[in-house]
Image: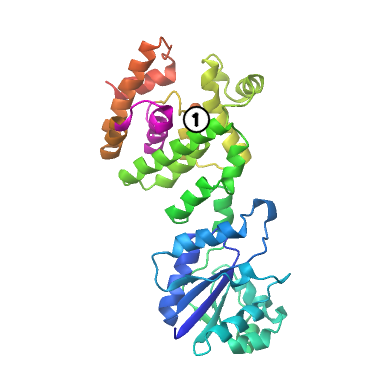
Amino acid sequence: MKNIVLFGGAFDPIHNGHINMALEASTQLDADIFFIPARISIWKSQSAPIEDKLQMVELAIKNYPKLHLSRYEADSKEEVNYSIDTVKYFKKEYPDSNLYYLIGTDHVNSFHKWKDAKELSKLAKIVYFKRPDMVVDINNVKEFDMVEINGELKDESSTEIRELKSLDTPDKVIDYIINNRLYFMKKIASYMSEKRLVHTISTAKLSYEIALANNLKDAKKALIAALLHDIGKEMPMTEQKEIMKKHFKEYINYPPVIYHQFIGAYLVEKDFGITDPIILDAIKYHTTANSNMSDVAIIVHCADKIEPTRGFESQNLINGLKSSLINGFVEVLKSNVEYYVRHNIDYKNDLQMACLNQYLK
Ligand SMILES: [Fe+2]
Ligand SMILES: [Fe+2]
């Protein structure tokens, strides 16, 4: 390796911004990039264990031959990992390579406070991405002979992913988070039984598959809405009634089993701070459906009804939704009605009828 960029960080979790930065640095400096996840967590309880962070980086960079994972800081027994030690380690391992050390703009301005800053900047050339919202301390840039590289560093994404406000990370990482119940999955799990969580995950995975098969630009919104669709379901009925009286009076005479769709939307906004109307509406009408539904709402409604753990043969309906969302939706509605009639379920509420009148005419 001729040129090596050391890219340290929390990677809690890794996101597309990190990968784009690494690829950008790799191209501009003609370099191999080492991701070096930090062992210490800054966000403590919201954080993922270091082994999970390493796994997620590995999954995310798998298809890029110039991107690598280093366990150096993760495996370190020191109480604190200083960058100078990491740089010295790489210097020893790769004596013939040019080393670069990648930092964020905020670190440019505090770099003089780092341990052995001068020595560090001699062993590895300091490179940074400019951030449009931050002023760079030009004294530090000169003093430590730093190089700016083009491109933009997005710092907020890891927090947004932990809170389920965005899922801007490779699909393999999303799968890992869901399957290992990290970050937002821990919070979602706190609203429901294991059985409902399994149904939730299955609904979410199917929703995302259907959205991708239909090339939906809002595919991630379908995934987020599906992950959250049933968080109101296990709230005690007395509490559900209170919230219905206060916030959804117009639906108070609906069968109580339907309340949870409104409660869910209410909780998602209140507890998760998610305000996207596409996501909220998909949750708010996931049981009854409605007229004029978004693609995301159609997907969540259908996936909820036919996801495989429900235990009936739904593969034809799934295939139908994947080849054409709207035709598949009509088939799901027909099978819903058949089911209601067969089981003597009263389905003729205004929302449901508005949906059937529009889409089944
Ligand atoms: Fe539900
Ligand atoms: Fe559900």
Q: Is residue 260 above or below residue 128?
A: above
Q: Residue at x 49, y 90 (%)?
A: 96
On whether residue 358 falls in the magenta region, the answer is: no
Q: Residue at x 32, y 21 (%)?
A: 335
Q: Quadrant of residue 76?
A: bottom right
242 sits left or right of 307 in the view: right
Residue, disc 1: 284
Kind of element beneath mark 1: helix
Q: Is residue 146 visible?
A: no
Q: Main secondary structure of the magenta part?
A: helix
Question: Which image quadrant: the N terminus?
Answer: bottom left
Q: Quadrant of residue 244?
A: top right
Q: Where does residue 307 sit, x and y in percent of width and height?
A: 40, 32
Find the magenta span and give its range.
291-315
> Could you tell me how many numbered marks the image carries?
1
355 sits left or right of 42 in the view: left
Q: Residue at x 45, y 39 (%)?
A: 204
The amino acid on which the numbered mark 1 sits, given as a three-letter code, is: Lys
Q: Residue at x 39, y 32 (%)?
A: 308
Q: Where does residue 164 sit, x and y in percent of width and height?
A: 54, 47
